[in-house]
Amino acid sequence: MDRLEEMFDRRYRFMESLNKKIPGSSPIELDLSKKEDQQICRDVALRGVEEMFEALQHLKNWKPHRVTDISGFDREKFLEEMVDAFNYFFSLLIMAGFDDLDLFKEYCRKDKIIHKRLEDGY
């Protein structure tokens, strides 16, 4: 099992465990043609975005107009929040019926496109 596959597997198993403990709390499969499932998808995506914002809270020197420099950066806390975000995004992919191979294949396809855009001056 490669690392990406293991990450998907771990998230899937967590979702199963969560559903056993709290039935219906983390659907494994959504039908994105249904309104209620689209709402669940959006809610899960927003939770991932919230975690991204929590990670960004650890960046103290992002304001271009700030004159003073805040020293220190909690790298571990930043990474922890990023992992939380990835977990929600992995859940979202799983719920939508995608797996590690789908993600990898699409990542590679899109990577070629963005490299081509860079070469072409997009």
Image (spheres, grey):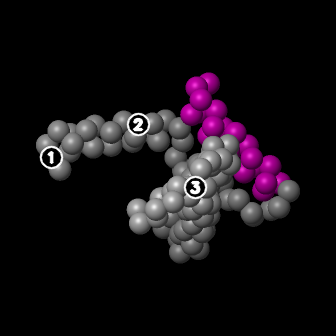
Label 1: how many Cα within 10 Å (few below 14, some 14–19, many 20+):
few
Residue numbers of the magenta segment: 1-20
Q: Residue furthest top?
A: 1
Check contact, mark 3 vs mark 2: CB within 8 A: no
Label 3: which residue?
Answer: 70
Q: Which residue lies furthest to the front in this view?
A: 68
In the image, 122 versus 87, the foreground residue is: 122
Q: Residue furthest left?
A: 120
In the image, 32 versus 53, the foreground residue is: 53
Does the magenta segment cover residue 5? yes
Please give the label number shown on residue 105.
2
Q: Is the magenta stretch mostly helix, strand or loop?
A: helix
Amino acid tagged 3 = Ile
Does the magenta segment cover residue 18? yes
Amino acid tagged 1 = Gly
Please give the label number shown on residue 57.
none
Please give the label number shown on residue 121.
1
Check contact, mark 1 vs mark 3: CB within 8 A: no
Across and down, in percent, residue 112 comes to: 28, 37
Mark 3 element type: loop
Label 3: how many Cα within 10 Å (few below 14, some 14–19, many 20+):
few
Mark 2 element type: helix
Residue at mark 1 to residue at mark 3: CA–CA distance: 36 Å
User: Is tag 3's residue or tag 2's residue first in the polypeptide sequence?
Assistant: 3
Tell me where residue 39 sits by quadrant.
Answer: bottom right
Tell me where residue 43 sits by quadrant.
Answer: bottom right
